Amino acid sequence: MNRIKSVIATGVLCLGLLTASVGSACTNFLFTKGATADGSTMITYAADSHTLYGELYYRKAADYPAGTMFMLVEWDTGKPLFKIPQVAHTYSVVGNMNECQLAIGETTYGGREECWNKPVKGIDYGSLIYVTLQRAKNAREAIKVMAELCDTYGYCSEGESFSICDPNEVWVMDLIGKGVGEYDTVKGKPVLKKAYKGFKEGAVWVARRIPDGYVCGHANQARITTFPQEVKGSWKAISSKNMSHIFDPEVECVYSHDVVAFARMKGWYDGKDADFSFADTYAPLTFSGVRACDARVYAMFRRVNKSMEQYEDYAMGWNNDNRMPLWVKPDHKLSLQEVMDLMRDHYEGTPMDMSQDVGAGPFACPYRWRPMGFSIDGKNYIHERATSTQQTGFSFVAQCRSWLPNKVGGIIWFGVDDTYSTVYCPMYCGITEIPECFREGNGDMLTYSPTSAFWLFNRVTNFVYSRYKDMIVDLQKVQRELETSFINQVAVNDQSVKNLTDPALTDKLNSFSNGRANQMMNRWNQLDQYLLVKYIDGNIKKEENGKFKRSEYNMAVPPSQPQYPESFYRAIVKDHGDIIIEK
């Protein structure tokens, strides 16, 4: 058993933490080649924030003369940080995938506040992703680049988990900063009192390759506990002092050389090196770290492997001793559509199902407006935080296919807004033109644009929330129609372009991805109009043979007006019956 010598964790069980943790809450699932039906690797990412606008980033490949500098800009805030040297050549990047089929996602877990709650110069987690995508060709190279960036420039964000995949391998990486020392507060500002002797600025971290045939996930809680450590003569695990060996295929674990030593220096750990747990030391479990975070991973695990239901008490935050494994083998190989659907979850089939309690209202809406926590009569309660949530800016399924040329093999299936009601649209990693509906600058969080997918999908979804159990059925029909069509069209297009070379290849990929985005926008605008006509004013129009039903005189027939469920009427009577009773 690890001996952890402090109880300062990702937070404490309190209303404030549950409220504060929402802003940086994201979800990642990871799938190896042997776990998928077609042999592709995949990672998923939901970028969830109440201030993040859904758009598809693009960075053009470029060559730079020696001495070129560029400014790091903090992804969350837009704040300029500092300049660093540019490399001679950068790869093009579409969203979170580059032209080499390298994809990276993240979730923020926070971790020990001493590691990040004082101003520290360094690269932020967003820049760490997007700079690495411009510089690395594969997952192992990405880990090396990320480690070197942190070691060279420091790290200024909270604790992060990263998903990293290429066409052959999938890795998970937990990372947290080290700060620069101990501080005093002078006139309300932090002042460095004592540097950490023998430790550089930067981060401590562990990265593990997911065994082929398995799936993994992380959702705002550090996931790597104990891990293989370097043994003389064996390279299955290496420290950052031996990074030159990271490209040896037998290496399955890489970690910062001071990951244990730093914890010892801080007094957070005094056990054996072999028993050291990254997550237990740098991000100890709390109720919110499990119920609002790890529970989302549990929801995915139980859908791909029924035996995972044994961890339900853990997922509910009631039994931390029954912690889930880092990865699990699915009951069957998963299709692309199944992976998309795994991102659509409200804890259906579990006690946490958000459509089953009175908070869902009369139309079983599995959403709760923030804040997540609330207090009644001195007791604290929570709303669930599911994978599908209203405040998603964008999400994707990154699919990497080793049997195709890189620019064709890599697809970022991109969607905006709530994962449950989005459409994943295929964007080849080799495109150089972003569709207008996803383009940066086409609207923002405070500026509506009629040609923006983010605003169109939000308009539809926010209407659907008002009569959820009825409208979501209509939405899902169109969602499935489009995604099925896209998957079939991609299969045909792959064959027609796989032997092309540039510039014909890029032109074809641009035309295809932009065409699918236009198809999606046109069909979703039709859905928007259809839902408004069908459900206006709480009524439901009657349909016949795919059209709204009219009378013999071409007038609208009277709509149906379904009653509320009896349970809702009873709740009304209990609350207000003495006023509305007939006498």
Image (cartoon, helix red, strand yellow):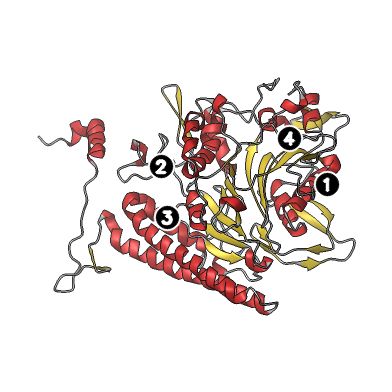
Nearer to us of marks 4 and 3 is 4
For marks 4 and 3, the one nearer the N-term is 4
For marks 2 and 4, the one nearer the N-term is 4
Query: Amino acid type of disc 2?
Result: Glu
Task: Measuring from the top left, give residue 29's x and y in whole percent.
Answer: 57, 47
Task: State left or right for residue 203 relative to residue 226.
Answer: right
Query: CB under 8 Å between callouts 4 and 1?
Result: no
Q: Is residue 336 above or below residue 510?
A: above
Query: CB under 8 Å between callouts 1 and 2?
Result: no
Q: Residue furthest left?
A: 583
Q: Which residue is mark 2?
A: 348
Q: Which mark is residue 461?
A: 3
Query: CB under 8 Å between callouts 4 and 3?
Result: no
Foreground pick, 416 / 187: 416
Q: Secondary structure at mark 1?
A: helix
Location of the C terminus by quadrant is top left
Nearer to us of marks 3 and 1 is 1
Task: Measuring from the top left, give residue 480's x and y in whole percent.
Answer: 42, 61
Answer yes or no: is residue 124 visible: yes
* CA separation in Å, label 4 and label 3: 45 Å
Q: Which mark is residue 245?
A: 1
* CA separation in Å, label 3 and label 2: 19 Å
Query: Amino acid type of disc 1?
Result: His
Query: CB under 8 Å between callouts 3 and 2?
Result: no
Q: How many marks?
A: 4
Task: State left or right for residue 200 relative to residue 16.
Answer: right
Residue located 24% across and 42% down the image:
565
Alpha-carbon neighbours of circle 4 within 10 Å: few (<14), some, or many (≥20)? some
